[in-house]
Amino acid sequence: MRLILLGAPGAGKGTQAEILSRELNIPTISTGNILRAAMKNGTPVGLKAKSYVEAGQLVPDDVIIGIIEERLAQPDCSNGYILDGVPRTIPQAQAMEESGIGIDWAVSIEIADEVIVERMSGRRTCKNCSQTFHIVNNPPKQEGICDFCGGELTIRKDDAPETVRTRLEVFHKETEPLKDFYAERGKLKTVDNQPSIEATTAAIREALGI
Ligand code: AMP
């Protein structure tokens, strides 16, 4: 299964990707996580990406295309993958197509902007392994500590309300047109955000017939 998860920042792509990854036994590739790791390690890609990520803007397409081509060539992607947060622009989707990166379905998680802004204020991210939690909807067992690796949970800089609003604007302008791009190819499934994580997973499974 080769899936793209589409949706606004905070729609739950990362959370759903992680669940589906485990169930389907295929890796999730999150360009956001790759960029944050590169920034933390101060690599050339990280240095290039930092100002864009922190301002809530998109990192240039050529940087993203390089990252994704390299990552998808790894052997663990040979049985399928879930792409979380990529492609995010039409040129990225075209470049992926031209490189022969196959896709079975693009699943769009539909959610209202107001719900996002409220939700993002409660998001906490592990500094160490990037796992995300929510203080109300998906709290860690121990406050401030990652259930998976014991790392410290922090608020991502770009989850600040003003930056979230910028990210939503960027989403509507640059990323939402991808729904038409995949619909034209007969590859779009849309799923409404549900009141719980489990219900949204069930809706995705139903849409995909898995
Ligand atoms: P995310 O964790 O997916 O919300 O990504 C966090 C930030 O990383 C975004 O706001 C962008 O600045 C950058 N980013 C992640 N993926 C992409 C992408 N495919 N294209 C451009 N920028 C990206």
Image (spheres, rainbow, N blue to C red):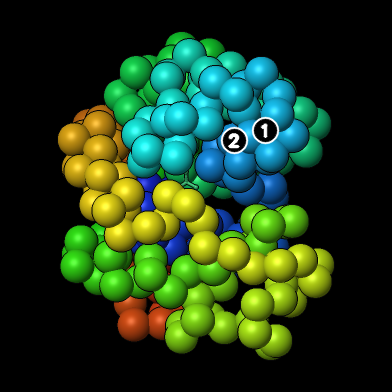
| Vertical side of 191 occupied by 47: above or below | above
Rendered residue at 37%/47% (across/down) = 6
Q: Nearer the viewer, residue 171 or 161?
A: 161
Rendered residue at 80%/71% (across/down) = 150
| Vertical side of 15 occupied by 76: above or below | above
Q: In the structure shown, which secondary structural element does the residue marked by tag 1 occupy?
A: helix
> Disc 2 designates what residue?
35
Q: Is residue 170 left or right of residue 101?
A: left
Q: Nearer the viewer, residue 36 or 13?
A: 36
CA gap between label 2 and label 1 equals 5 Å
x, y percentage for residue 115?
25, 71
The reply to whether residue 186 is in sight is no
> Disc 1 designates what residue?
38
Q: Is residue 24 left or right of residue 4?
A: right
Using a 10 Å C-alpha cutoff, classify the residue at mark 2 as few (fewer than 14 neighbours), some (14 to 19) or many (20 or more).
many
Q: Is residue 52 left or right of residue 44?
A: left
Q: In the structure shown, which secondary structural element does the residue marked by tag 2 occupy?
A: helix
Labels 2 and 1 touching (C-beta < 8 A): yes
Rendered residue at 37%/58% (across/down) = 160
Q: Amino acid at mark 1?
A: Ala
Q: Nearer the viewer, residue 157 or 6?
A: 157
Using a 10 Å C-alpha cutoff, classify the residue at mark 1 as few (fewer than 14 neighbours), some (14 to 19) or many (20 or more).
some
| Vertical side of 65 occupied by 135: above or below | below
Picture quadrant of residue 133: bottom right
**Would the CB of label 2 be found within 8 Å of ligand 1?**
yes
x, y percentage for residue 54?
44, 40
Picture quadrant of residue 78: top right
x, y percentage for residue 127?
68, 57
Q: Amino acid at mark 2?
A: Leu
